[in-house]
Amino acid sequence: MDFLRLPKNEYITLAVFSLVVLTMPIWLQPLGAAYPGLMQQFTIFAIFAVGFNILFGLTGYLSFGHAAFLGVGSYTAVWSFKLLSMDAIPALIFAIVMAGIFALVIGFVSLRRSGIYFSILTLAFAQMSYNLAYSVLTPITNGETALQLAGSDPRVLDSLFAVGTSAVIPSPSLLGNTLGGMGGFYLCAIILLVVFFIAQKIFTSPFGMMLRAVKSNQTRLSYTGVNTRPYTLAAFVISGMYAGLAGGLLAVTDPLAGAERMQWTASGEVVLMTILGGVGTLIGPVIGAWLIKFMENIFSAYNDRILQFYFDWMPDGIQDFAVTVASKFVGEGWKLTEGLVFVLVVVFLPGGIMEGVRRIRSMVGNRHKREERSSKLSTSAAE
């Protein structure tokens, strides 16, 4: 069972991470974010960010077009629901496979270049995919109105086994159990834990070490006779499959697929998540994804009435001033808060939030060492 083997510290990380993910409904309650739809977004976009980090964090190749694979996964999953079955398993499998094939084609072309040229190529492919989905391939994607389920869909496998054959549109299910609310969240949570474990294996494997070598000095590797393209292409395909899985889960939790999931803004969002949390770390992109989705869904819902409640302890004049200032950073202005947080992290914590965690841990460790050293000196002086 070598596949399940990890360094001891990685088992501890996985155990703590599993506890945090599975107890989301508890610790998100005081933050007002413990409802299934938002927790599903937390887990799905964490999968997206972890997969993107395998490419960007390990190889240094910055893709501006990863939303294309997210969209492919969503469209594939919805077509699986329409043609085959409402069961989530085949939908997710097809989403991963199709996104992997799509990533193989795009990666084969894009990886002929590196640096900014690679980034521009991936952005170009993503924009072409978006325009194909929005206006050209409308018989397949349904264009701007998005691909949705209908009562007239054949659903061959469900019809064969007389499952969900009524005119009413059924909900996605897992082995006959309807996926809704907390059931959908825990499906996404368990899949997040599985793909996080796979990412741990990649990070600690010889393959991961080779990807780090590519990021460190690809030219030197080439001079030593190592062909780096198979490694970078494999990382690109794996990353694309993660994105396809995330897109498939978006369709499982909300059975529709639109071209907006392929827009360049969606690709930029996952870049932001990864940089904000910490490029090249395992936990960092997950934290970045959670933080951005929290701001998008919670901060954007704040209004003057809520702010009045928070600043109720202030004198009236100061309270009105505080509400006026704070209102510019919440509600419709939540993007301003996101931008300020990103600027502060990049300027003061270039390694992301995880660098801040490392600094705090280092400060605490050094403090304990100083205390132990002073204690030993005091003991020696007393003797």
Image (cartoon, rainbow, N blue to C red):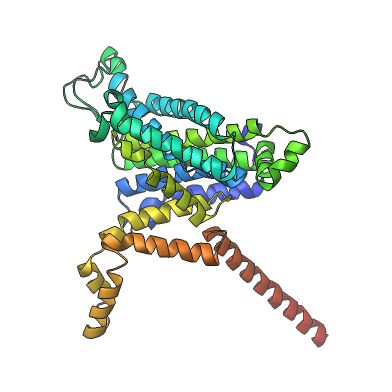
Work out whether 353 lies above or below 194: below
Q: Residue at x 45, y 37 (%)?
A: 124
Which residue is nearer to you in this view: 261 or 369? 261
Question: Quarter of the image holding residue 301?
Answer: bottom left
Left or right placement of residue 380 versus residue 179 in this view? right
Picture coordinates of residue 297, whole percent (x, y):
31, 54
Picture coordinates of residue 308, whole percent (x, y):
23, 73
Work out whether 35 lies above or below 68: below
Number of numbered tags placed on the structure image: 0
Picture coordinates of residue 174, whole percent (x, y):
35, 29
Which residue is nearer to you in this view: 111 or 54? 111
Work out whether 331 lies above or below 170: below
* Residue 31 visible in the snapshot: no
Which residue is nearer to you in this view: 172 or 332? 332
Question: Quarter of the image holding residue 379?
Answer: bottom right
Picture coordinates of residue 314, whole percent (x, y):
27, 82
Q: Residue at x 67, y 34 (%)?
A: 228
Q: Residue furthest left?
A: 167
Left or right placement of residue 306 versus residue 264 in this view? left
